C-alpha cells in the first residue's frame, strides 16, 4: 500500500507580503508639518516655509512609502501612470494619475517613496473631487503588488475648510 499522508489538506502557497504607507501629502496640514520640520532641522528659513505653504496646490498628491519598495525598483513612469488612479465612491469617477515622482536613496537607484499627482480640476475647470464626495479610493498596481487605500475625505477638514 502507498503512503497516504496525514490526510491534512496541503498548505496554501505563501504569498509575499509587503506593508506600504499611503499618505495624502497635498493636504495643507501635511505640507505645513513637512515645512515646519524643515525649519526645525535648519534646512529652511521660517519666512520661506510660510511663503511655500501659502502657494496654491494645482494637483492632489498621494505618496507611497514602505520598508520594502522592491515592486517600484524597476517600474517606469509610463506603466505606473497607466495603473494608478483615484476612484470617487459616490460618483464612481476614475481620476487617472498625471504625474509620478520617485524619492530615491543616496545611491540614486533605490526607491524610498513614490509620489503620484492627480488633477484637481477637469479640462472644463470643474473639481475632480466634488465638494459633497465623502470617500476616495487610491489604487496602484505595480510588479504584482496591488496597493489600495481608502481616504475618508469627509473628515479631511481644517480651520480653512476641506484639506486635500
Image: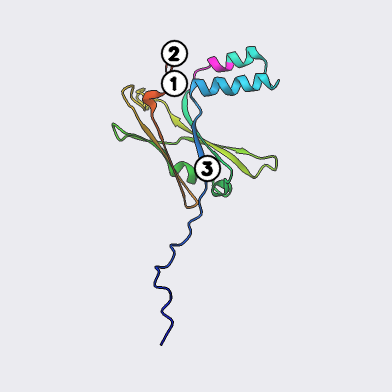
In this picture, residue 101 sits left or right of residue 138: right
Q: What element carries label 2?
A: loop
Among the two numbered marks 1 and 3 on one chain, the one whose residue lies closer to the N terminus: 3
Whether pointer 1 and pointer 3 mark residues with C-beta atoms closer than 8 Å, the reply is: no
In this view, the residue farthest toward the bottom is 1
Sequence order check: which comes first, mark 3 or mark 2?
3
Q: Residue 91: x and y, percent?
A: 28, 32
Q: Which numbered marker is on residue 163?
A: 1
* 3D distance between C-alphas at marks 1 and 2: 8 Å
When asked about the image quadrant of residue 41, the answer is: top right
Q: Which mark is residue 77?
A: 3
Please say whether residue 56 is one of the residues in the magenta stretch. yes
Q: Which residue was labeled with disc 2?
A: 160
First to last magenta residue range: 52-57
Front residue of this view, candidates 22 and 60: 22
Residue 49 to residue 142: above or below: above
Work out whether 86 lies above or below 120. Answer: below
Q: Are marks 1 and 2 in contact (CB under 8 Å)?
A: yes
Looking at the picture, how far across and down is residue 125, in whole percent?
Answer: 36, 22
Q: Quadrant of the C terminus?
A: top left
Instruction: Give the x, y percent position of residue 159.
Output: 44, 13
Amino acid at each position: 500500500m502507498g503512503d497516504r499522508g496525514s490526510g491534512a489538506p496541503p498548505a496554501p502557497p505563501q504569498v509575499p507580503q509587503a506593508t506600504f504607507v499611503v499618505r495624502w501629502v497635498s493636504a495643507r496640514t501635511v505640507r505645513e508639518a513637512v515645512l515646519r520640520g524643515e525649519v526645525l532641522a535648519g534646512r529652511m528659513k521660517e519666512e520661506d516655509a510660510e511663503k511655500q505653504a501659502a502657494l496654491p496646490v494645482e494637483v492632489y498628491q498621494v505618496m507611497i512609502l514602505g520598508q520594502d519598495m522592491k515592486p517600484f525598483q524597476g517600474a517606469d513612469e509610463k506603466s505606473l501612470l497607466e495603473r494608478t488612479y483615484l476612484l470617487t465612491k459616490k460618483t464612481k469617477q476614475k481620476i487617472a494619475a498625471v504625474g509620478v515622482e520617485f524619492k530615491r536613496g543616496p545611491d540614486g537607484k533605490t526607491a524610498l517613496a513614490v509620489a503620484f499627482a492627480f488633477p484637481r480640476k477637469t479640462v472644463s475647470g470643474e473639481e475632480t473631487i466634488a465638494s459633497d464626495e465623502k470617500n476616495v479610493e487610491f489604487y496602484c498596481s505595480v510588479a504584482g503588488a496591488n496597493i489600495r487605500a481608502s481616504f475618508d475625505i469627509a473628515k479631511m477638514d481644517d480651520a480653512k475648510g476641506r484639506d486635500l
